[in-house]
Amino acid sequence: SKGPKAWLVDRMEDASDLPNAVEALLRIQYKHNQHSRNLQADAAFWASVSVLHGSEDSEMRRLDGRKLTPEDFSLRYADRPALLTGLAEDWAAKERWTLETLLESHGDTEFQIAGGRIRLRWYVNYVRRSSADWPFYIFEENLQEERAALLEDYRAPEVFGNDLLCLPKGQRPARRYFLIGPRGTGTLLHQDPMMTSAWNTLVH
């Protein structure tokens, strides 16, 4: 018989069934993954916190990114987490990436979630109806074709300097991701491609 992921993809044509399909998949994934999530949280996350506790590195640095040069950031802050403010104030994404405007421009565009691809309007329908404490989120790396317009709505802050993943096309790993998710979404501790460090921007 078909597994839950295949069933989810099959039922995507009926928007009214989508929340139930995603919830069923969510319950199954939660049951099978909860044990490993707990182990990783205990073994990795809390170990990291205990190492940093009591040191000057235990506090997240909050900096005005507009006042930093790439050289200053690289020498003083690139080896530890930091919260940089003011870097996205003039992005078009501030206006274009609300749920309402995204539904107008990309409502029928498919995006990646765990288990398959889903139209944005169906995902928003799921978010608004779901009461899951560990909900699905969109995690899209293919910013081409109908999703390519999203690349025009932001620019990489100058403070981060050159892109170190500037390998020839076809050899470099995915380096840009577009995410949408409600409260409660997140990821486990992980290593980014080629042991690089990422910058993330919360738009809304």
Image (tube, rainbow, N blue to C red):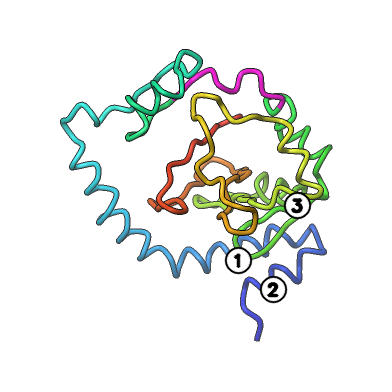
CA gap between label 3 and label 1 equals 16 Å
Q: Is residue 66 left or right of residue 147?
A: left
Lower sequence index among marks 2 and 3: 2
- Measuring 63% from the left and 43% from the top, which residue is drawn there? 178
Residue found at x 78% / y 39%: 149
Q: Nearer the viewer, residue 162 or 184?
A: 162
Give amino acid for label 3.
Trp
Where 57 falls versus 125 (above or below)? Answer: above
Which of labels 3 and 1 is toward the front? 3
- The answer to whether the residues at label 2 and label 1 have Cβ atoms under 8 Å apart is yes
Residue 177 at x, y = what percent? 60, 46
Q: Which residue is mark 3?
A: 122
Residue named by callout 2: 7
Which residue lies at the image location 36% right of the left edge and 65% below the top edge? 36
Depth check, front residue: 159 or 200: 159
Relative placement, left or right, of 144 versus 195 is right
**In whole angstroms, how far apart are the C-alphas of marks 2 and 3?**
16 Å
What secondary structure is found at the residue carrying circle 2? helix
Task: State which region is magenta.
Answer: 84-92
Q: Position of residue 172 (x, y in %)?
A: 57, 54
| Magenta span contains residue 142 | no
At label 1, the amino acid type is Ala
**Residue 39, picture quadrant:** bottom left
Q: Position of residue 1 (x, y in %)?
A: 65, 86
Crowd around label 1: few <14 · some 14–19 · many ≥20 (10 Å): some
Query: Mark 1 — residue?
Result: 24
| Mark 2 to mark 1 CA distance (whole Å) | 10 Å
Secondary-structure class at tag 3:
helix
- Name the main secondary structure of what is drawn in magenta: loop
Whether the residues at callouts 3 and 1 have beta carbons within 8 Å, the answer is no
Residue occupying the far front of the picture: 168
